[in-house]
Image (cartoon, grey):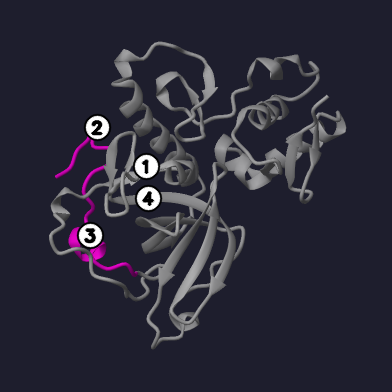
Amino acid sequence: MANYGYQGAYSTTNYGAQAGAQEGGGFMSGSQQGSQENSSKTYGQESLRPVTIKQIIDAQQPHPEAEFKIDGSDLTQISFIGQINSVTKRATNILYKLDDGTGLIEVMQWVNSDVDPDTVQPTAKEGEYLRIFGRLRSFNNKRSVTAHMIRPITDFNEVSYHLLEATAIHLYFVRGPPDSINDGGVKADPGTGMFVDSYDGAANGAMGASAKKLPAKMSAGAKTVFGLLQSAPQSNEGLHVHSIAAQLSMTSNDVFKAGDELLGEGLIYTTVDDETWAVLEY
């Protein structure tokens, strides 16, 4: 059983060779279809690691036939959570584009070509969150994930927990055991793209130094959202309300209230739509 020292934080999967050997799997139950893995692969050594999409995109692959690596360790099966950006249904597969606030990745789910996907799978809609179990692939220098299991997120706390877990495991590899860390402070971790507070890996929106300069009348929620918008990795479009809520463990309603305050003060502005915000630079 593979154990990388972080209190069993990620190890071999309970579906092992059966799930790993087939690149299929339906939304919820579904069907399986795909290519057989190399028969010489030792499935007993496989691990399941929680990651962020940024880690997937930044994973290293020494050569085309080699395993991907994150933090110098082989990456076999991965698990991550993302919000559906788009869904494309095809005859043999469904292609999801998922965003977790740190990046965007395509996820392919194979389906049985003899069965109508609509008859065996619930409809996954844009804006919903999914938990993905699968493998990282690269074709023509483009990264994607082949999923062997996909399930919807029913408890929003799972989103925050996953980001915390992925960050904590990354920090274990790059900084060592928790007792060896004593640098303090809130900062954006370059490995996962998440906010971290010392080693604890607390993916949170604690306001940075610049957020303390906000008007005294501003609510704590607004200050927290502003701190995240200033410090979190993001595209030129800024961050969507759902991404902010996920990273801060806030409800969307509370994020909207905070956004209204910040918009009213002229501190942030809307970008691609009314629910995507960026800090107004002076």
Establish if 76 lies above or below 168. below
Q: Specify the quadrant of the image occupied by residue 1.
A: top left
User: Badge 1: few (under 14), some or many (20 or more) residues near its Cα, within 10 Å?
Assistant: some
Find the magenta span and give its range: 1-24
Q: Which residue is mark 1?
A: 60
The residue closer to the viewer here, 265 or 3, is: 3
Disc 3 to disc 1, how far (Cα)? 26 Å
Q: CA distance from mark 4 to mark 1?
A: 17 Å
- Label 4 vs 1, first from the N-terminus: 1
According to the picture, the residue beneath numbered tag 3 turns out to be: 15
Coordinates of residue 33 in the picture (x, y in percent): 32, 75
Q: Earlier in the sequence, mark 3 or mark 1?
A: 3
Residue 131 sits in quarter: bottom left
Can you tell which of label 3 and label 1 is closer to the viewer?
1
Q: Is residue 10 magenta?
A: yes
Q: Name the residue type under label 2.
A: Gln
**Residue at which label 2 appears:** 7
Determine crowd level at label 3: few under 14, some 14-19, many 20+ residues with C-alpha closer than 10 A.
Answer: few
Residue type indicated by callout 4:
Ser
